[in-house]
Amino acid sequence: MTGTLERLAALDTCAVSDALDSLGLPGAALGLHAVANGRRIAGTALTVDLVEAGTTTAPRHLCTAAVDTSGPGTVIIVAHHGRTHVAGWGGVLSAGAVTRGVEGVIVDGAVRDLDEAHEFGLTLYAATSVPVTARSRVVERDWNVPVDFAGVTVEPGDYVLADGSGVVAVPCERIDEVLSIAEAIAAKEREMLRRVRLGESMATVMSADYETMLNRKASR
């Protein structure tokens, strides 16, 4: 991992989301959670955009180009646009992704073959699972392009973090600023936890200052 990815992986999505909030930036991809091998993942986005079959001519099976060019430090982002009636990711793709060493895969819709994802050790985040195949139902429109993804825009190379609280995406050109603010927020919350464990009252620890900690000056 690069230094930037190491810094990102050391944070949680809540601190990063708070940092994005403090800058007035969207970033939380809503409605997604770990469905296989739920561990924290951090990486740069490699995107895929899916559409209904028949709306475009697909040159290949969905997600295969992204898998073939993926590797350590990358997270495959599949823009399935909230579809839950058909899978946008499956078991053979999971095997390929693990073989190439990806950090994980995140799909804003349904996936399938979760038993295989667990078996292969792939960390997979999605909205839900369904056994229905993508074949003849959805196809790849394009890959390595900007995508609308669960309420945020994700561009290739943007930074992605996922954990038990959800998924956030950070524009690559803002990553240093977001990391600095998120690290300050995390440090402040660690100090608050220390005070709680020492027996200070919650009213004191979570004083009015807590309500303003997303202010940029307060979070630095």
Image: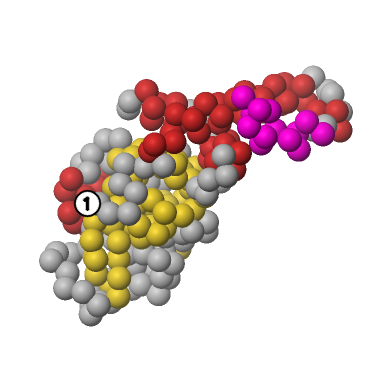
Q: Which residue is mark 1?
A: 66
Which portion, as a residue range, is magenta?
A: 208-220
Compared with residue 110, is residue 75 higher up or lower down, i.e. above or below? above
Q: Secondary structure at mark 1?
A: helix
Residue at x-position 50% and y-position 47%: 27
The answer to whether 40 is drawn above or below residue 88 in the figure is: above
For label 1, the crowd category at 10 Å Cα-Cα, with few meaning under 14, some 14 to 19 and many 20 or more, is: many
- Image spot of residue 81 (x, y percent): 40, 66
Say how the picture is coloured: secondary structure
> Which sits in the foreground, 142 or 69?
142
Can residue 13 be seen?
A: yes
Horizontally, residue 113 falls left or right of residue 202, namely: left
* Residue 32 seen anywhere in this rendered image of the structure: no
The quarter of the displayed image where residue 184 is located: top right
Q: Locate the N terminus and report the quarter of the image it occupies.
A: top left
Where is residue 138, by image quadrant? bottom left
Asked if residue 201 lies in the magenta stretch, the reply is: no
At x 66% / y 36%, what residue is drawn?
214
Amino acid beneath label 1: Ala
